[in-house]
Image (tube, rainbow, N blue to C red):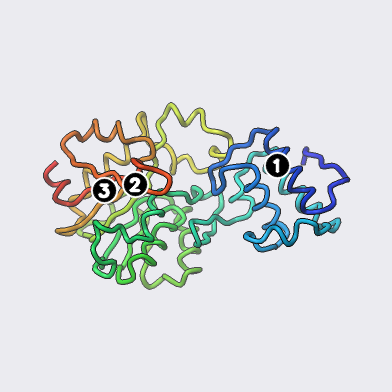
Amino acid sequence: MSERFPDELETLRDWLRYAVTRFGQAKIAFGHGTTNAYDEAAYLLLHTLSLPIDRLEPFLDARLTRTERASVAAVLARRIDERIPAAYLTGEAWLGDFRFRVDPRVVIPRSFIAELFPDGLAPYIASAEAIRSALDLCTGSGCLAILLAHAFPNAEIDAADLSADALAVAQQNVVDYGLGDRIKLIRSDLFDRLHGKTYDLIISNPPYVPATAMGSLPPEFRHEPELALAGGDDGMDVVRAIIGAAPRHLNARGLLVVEVGRGRPAIEAAFPRLPFVWLATQSSSDAVFLLTRDDLAGG
């Protein structure tokens, strides 16, 4: 641990102020659950001290014990010196009110698709109860499969990923939520091991970082599995494969929902005849597209 912290830091308020300053000076990158130094510091401090992560104010003037100061210093040092994302330091990540186990075997959960589930993908899905089968491709930690299970209570869900390591983490999360009877984890390169299976809904948050951007990612992102990020020259290699195979795996009125980040120009150029519907979320307007089976068959 190369980072040294002043002995004068006694209260949680002291540590919070100092951590925010040091995060700014070190120019650490955010985007794995928080967007700024204050929120990141507050989360790491509260988690390390086993305090409620949504209750900072009551504890600000509490003095830390010697052992607690050592624990906080160690976590902050790793965040600053090694640029390890906070989620890997705490072993957890949140999507809304849902907590998931994470470690470096999986990409840290973050998805615009998750923002669509509270509304049940209305108006494109008239009734959440009508969805009987769903597939989450590139499931990673299993977070979106678990959100699918909560949003569509009658759905049996397949969650596929090429990485056996990722599926091991997903299994832990599925067990944590008691969904082993509804979510089936499958090791598969996209649809390869899903022969003959069809679904009412297919979702995917696949790798979509272009090759040129992979080399310039902040150090925090390079702690994540490259397999879960790299999407080829223009970032759309996996997305093109999904679009090509999806019609064979959708039921008559089935829907395909895919996240592409900033890949809209590339994917529309690749499929100029497809009538992409771009779904607006709280934090994006064109990062997620929707296509019906009929759209795909006609394109």
- 238 left or right of 32 in image: left
Q: Residues within 10 Å of mark 1 (few under 14, many from 20)?
A: some
Residue in view at x 29 percent, y 66 percent: 128
Instruction: Mark 1 and mark 2 in contact? Answer it, CB < 8 Å.
Output: no
Q: Earlier in the sequence, mark 1 or mark 2?
A: 1
Name the residue furthest front: 57
Tag shown at residue 116: none
Residue at x-position 77% and y-position 39% = 3
Write down the quadrant of residue 47 in the picture. bottom right
Q: What's the CA distance linking mark 2 and mark 3? A: 11 Å
Circle 3 residue:
290
Residue mark closest to the camera, 3 vs 1: 1
Amino acid type at image mark 3: Leu
Residue beneath disc 1: 20
Q: Where is mark 2, residue-wise?
A: 280
N-terminal-most mark, 3 or 1:
1
In space, the residues marked 3 and 1 are separated at their CA atoms by: 40 Å
Reply above or below: 84 against 188: above
Q: Secondary structure at mark 2?
A: loop
Camera-side residue: 286 or 201? 286
